[in-house]
Amino acid sequence: MGQAVASVGSTIYDGDRLSTDIGGALRINGAAITLQVAARSSVTLRRAPTPEANVQAELGSGTITFSTGQAGNIAVLADDASIRPASHVSTMAQIWVITQKELLVYALRGSLNFSYHGDSKMILEGTKFRVLLDPSEREVDAASEPDNGRGNPVKLPVKFILIPIIAAAAVTIPMVVHALESPDKP
């Protein structure tokens, strides 16, 4: 906490910066909200200035996991993007800062509202996205679908791209099925 070492029962004040070292971890329990700050991460906690959230957690680096009950609400800020529960239901999410313009967002339970510079998208429960903020034209072209002969699409300014992460499941599921296969019935 700032320059001091946190211990069980430490009080956190509005504007406190929390960080963890290699191998460190921090868990913060509050009214209807739990935050877990992973190793090599930093987060600044504030009382939210808007009614959409009780707590505002500004993720500077690393990874944060949050869990909220129906009464709790949080807004995680990362590189000018805002990630918060889409509604007042139990929600759990994990956010990684990869680079200054790249995030990973995983909606473990409940849906999320992802906002960046006035644009927003819904991230549905159980989905994980790689998010590119202010993507280059090359990144936009690589992430967009082919035209399929329907004429030239109108190019609008793109503020962010959500790229679904499904490759891990496509590789992992067949490996698990193979590992659990009976030797008597291949």
Image (cartoon, helix red, strand yellow):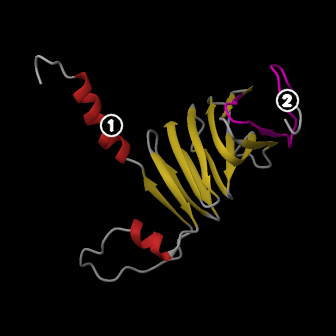
Mark 2 lies on residue: 5
Quadrant housing the N terminus? top right
Question: Do we see residue 111 in this rendering?
Answer: no
Assess whether residue 10 is covered by the magenta stretch. yes
In the figure, is residue 51 to the left or right of 109?
right
- Please say if 122 is above or below 132: above
Farthest residue to the front: give it: 22
Mark 1 lies on residue: 172
Q: Label 1: state its secondary structure.
A: helix
Say which amino acid is labelled 2. Answer: Val
Q: Label 2: state its secondary structure.
A: loop
Question: Do we see residue 157 in this rendering?
Answer: yes
Farthest residue to the left: give it: 185
Quadrant housing the C terminus? top left
The region drawn magenta spans 5-26
> Total of numbered circles in the picture?
2
